[in-house]
Image (spheres, rainbow, N blue to C red):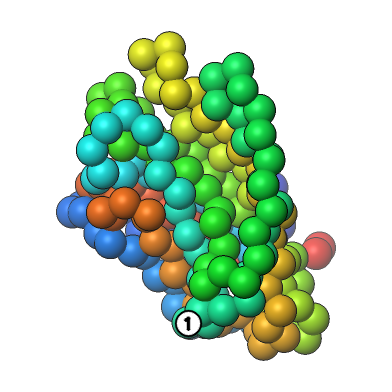
Amino acid sequence: MSQLPSTYTLISSNVLSTTAASVTFSAIPATFTDLVVRSSVRSTGTGAGVRNIYLSMNSVAANYSATQMRGLDSTASSSNRSGDSSWILGLSIGDGSTSNTFSNNEWYIPNYAGSASKISSNVNAAPNNTGSNQYDSAVANLQSSTAAITSLTLTDSSTGFATGSSFYLYGIKNS
C-alpha cells in the first residue's frame, strides 16, 4: 500500500489466511472525523468476471442507495439503486482471473460518528491481465440512519473472499 497521510490512523486490519464469507470491523471508536476502508481482494467465485462487494453498517439491512458509474473494457454504463439491504461498494475478481491478481478498493466515509445520514464514496479497479474484463467504477452511497457507525461488514456477492485478501480500516483526524 502507498504511503498514507499523517492524518490516517490504522484502526484494524485483516489479511485472510483462509477464505471468508465476510469481514467485519467492530467496536469502531467515535474519536475520528472520517473513516477509510481499503481492500485488496479476490473472490472464491468461479470464472474471470467481477463480483460486487457489499457493505453494511451496524447490522442495518435497509434503506441503502447508490449511484454507480462503471467502465468494463471499452464500455461505460451507470446505474442508480435504492431501498437496498446494503451498499454495493466495490469489486472483487473471480478465481478464473489472472493468478495472483487482486481488485483494489477504497471507501471514504465522512462524518461517520455524526447525527446526519451516512454517505460514502468509493473507487475501485479490477484488473485482469488477459486483456479483457478490465473493470473500474466509482460509487456514491447514502444510508438514512443517523446513528454513529460502530461496525462495518463487507461481503462478497459470490461465495466469499479468497485467502490473501486484505482489509484495512483507518480513522482520519482533521488535524
The residue that label 1 is drawn on is 59
Outermost residue, left side: 18
The quadrant in which residue 110 appears is bottom right
Closer-to-camera residue (27/143): 143
Q: Position of residue 98 (x, y in %)?
A: 30, 22
- Looking at the image, residue 92 lies above or below residue 154: above
Q: Indicate left or right for 113 with 16 as reference.
A: right
**Quadrant for the C terminus in the image:** bottom right
Outermost residue, top side: 131
Q: Residue at (37%, 55%) from the top-left corner?
A: 156
- Looking at the image, residue 161 lies above or below residue 64: above
Q: Is residue 11 visible?
A: no
- Looking at the image, residue 169 lies above or below residue 117: above
Closer-to-camera residue (85/54): 85
For disc 1, the neighbor class at 10 Å (few under 14, some 14 to 19, many from 20) is some
Kind of residue at badge 1: Ser
